[in-house]
Amino acid sequence: MTAAATDLLNVDADLGPEELETRDGVREFVDRRIRPNIAGWYADAVFPQEIVPEMAQLGLLGMHIQGYGCAGKSAVQYGIAMQELEAGDSGLRTFVSVQGSLAMSAIAKHGSEEQKQRWLPGMAAGEIIGCFGLTEPTAGSDPSTMATTAVREGDEWVLNGAKRWIGLASIAHVAVIWAKAVDESGKARVRGFLVPTGTPGFTAVPIEPKLSMRASVQCDITLEDVRLPADALLPENPGLRGPFSCLNEARYGIVWGALGAARDSFEAALAYAQQRIQFDKPLAAYQLSQQKLVNMALEIQKGQLLALRIGRLKDEDRLENHMISAGKLNNCRVAIEVCREARTMLGGNGVTLDHSPLRHANNLESVRTYEGTDEVHTLILGQHLTGHAAFR
């Protein structure tokens, strides 16, 4: 398979055989199953559940988790897969992220052995879909202010509250819900709970209409006296460390994924510029067009070097939290600008679904917002640089 036009420094040469195999396998899936259909899915606001089993067969669900039917691939392989998926569409990459990096990671990191055995194999096979309920209508960037509660009553926990912008919730079989758990002594701390979505009192309603992530599902969740057995509690790592460790997994995938949208937009602009004739020659023959293409290619290449560095550090267990923020902030910022610039090269045709850049740009408005806004990651990096927390 030929190198991407954006690979000015031959970064592909630093990828091993297994990493290239992952790239080529996911790219073939995207070319075959996503590209021919994504305009229709996006226009109709449809998430294509029929492709979930194929994603599972590729080992994409819980790809980085060891055991329990998961592929157990490296961080770099996972990142490469997310880049290729998002070249198809951010919403479809988001499905894999919510399923694997959030819901499955929460169970793998914080669940009991019994919980892992019960849920993870079916989730890896795509037979069970999960969601991750952290964000609330009034608690987005500051989850410490969440209002959802879990109160212990004898052998049960009773959950009440609301969650918003929860991916996959209306099609999920199990929800990982984070709540302020109040034990019988009156002490409260954030804990995670596994909630089968058929439990009485659990309601999930898709948020519509949306201008972004249209080939994906995001929902409002309502919890009204949802009663759970004691063993629904995730026993490990109580407190906000629990959901934050899962968010870091999702943020890592975005570092790579956003570049897939950028690369696809660049390639669309390059191809269009080569064949679109204006004033008797192709757009690609004009200096201003070449300047745009060069600037886009450079930013994508720098982002790929950043992603690969972060992935290698993650595989070596040397990755620090602020590094993930550097990758997420930079690569989302770069990607959305590349997609917008690519759209300008398509002229009026670029606002139709015949071409991908504006669809990618719209999706990236969501990607740069979830798993930490630009502002939040700026403050994380600012605290790392200065030693002063400026969140309040």
Image (cartoon, rainbow, N blue to C red):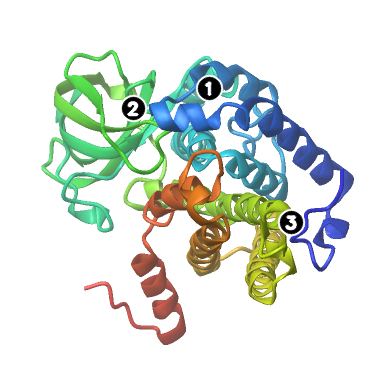
Residue denoted by label 1: 123
In the displayed structure, 18 sits above or below 104; it is below
Seen in the image, is 11 located left or right of residue 156? right
Specify the amino acid type for callout 2: Ala
Instruction: Give whichever of discs 2 and 3 has the lower sequence position.
Output: 2
Specify the amino acid type for callout 3: Gln
Q: Residue at x 69, y 76 (%)?
A: 287
Q: Residue at x 55, y 53 (%)?
A: 258
Residue denoted by label 2: 169
Mark 1 surroundings: few (<14), some (14-19) or many (≥20) residues within 10 A = many
Measure how far apart labels 2 and 3 are at the Cα level: 43 Å
Foreground: 205 or 72?
205
In the displayed structure, 361 sits above or below 18; it is below
Residue denoted by label 3: 274
Specify the amino acid type for callout 1: Met
Does dot 3 land on a helix, a strand or a loop? helix
Foreground: 319 or 81?
81
Q: Quadrant of the N terminus?
A: top right
